[in-house]
Amino acid sequence: MTPVTRLHFTGDQDADEFLARDPLALLLGMLLDQQVPMEWAFRSPAVLRDRLGTKGLDAGRIAALDPERLVEVFSEKPALHRYPGSMAKRAHALCEYLVEHHGGRADAVWADAGSGKELFDRLVALPGFGKEKAKIFVAILGRFLGVQPDGWTDYQATWPSIADADGPGAIEKIREAKAAWKASGKKKV
């Protein structure tokens, strides 16, 4: 599978292309994807890049920032999240973890994962990631970026999620599918 050069997560071409080429942007977008619209969460890494005045995001640089400075950056209008303070602290913790455990490289989390289970376990270990977030991210990596270690499909999300955003206009279809999924009483497993 050839990795995509643009994801369709935000409706903004620059932000969508940035997500496809910057592993930390994609990881931060997934981190922020809670209690805000999906587009907002995944657009925020591009806004963060612009506010930091860089061409890409660097976990080492973010981890070296004073956490309160990062809160200020997240809180500038328009805020990067509904809860800019707590999410800035989570983003900071994630970057610190990447520096400590993966040489500051977000893609090192998945680059050499030998199995779907190993990939899933690495994602669950990240600050701010639980099992549901990890399964969605496994699906994103496998479906769009060609990261498909043996058994990866056993650890991917099976419910409607951002990992189903396969083209323009997909977000609305996902919202409808999520509503139908919830109405049916199905459980995430």
Image (tube, helix red, strand yellow):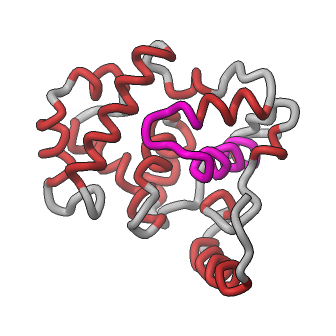
Prevailing secondary structure of the magenta residues: helix
How many circles with numbers are drawn on the protein?
A: 0
Instruction: Please indicate whether residue 178 sits to the left or right of residue 61 in the image.
Output: right
Closer to us: 54 or 42: 42
> Which residue range is magenta in the image?
124-143
Provide residue 97's location: percent of width, then percent of height. Answer: 41, 24
Was residue 141 drawn as part of the magenta stretch in this picture?
Answer: yes
Seen at 33% across and 20% down, the residue is 60
Instruction: Please indicate whether residue 18 sits to the left or right of residue 153 in the image.
Output: left
Q: Is residue 11 above or below residue 144?
A: below
Instruction: Please indicate whether residue 107 sits to the left or right of residue 86 in the image.
Output: right
Give the quarter of the figure containing the N terminus: top right
Closer to us: 35 or 73: 35
Was residue 138 drawn as part of the magenta stretch in this picture?
Answer: yes
Residue lying farthest right?
150
Provide residue 44's location: percent of width, then percent of height. Answer: 35, 53
Provide residue 175's location: percent of width, then percent of height. Answer: 59, 78
Seen at 44% across and 23% down, the residue is 98
Give the quarter of the figure containing the C terminus: bottom right
Residue 35, quarter of the rendered image? bottom left
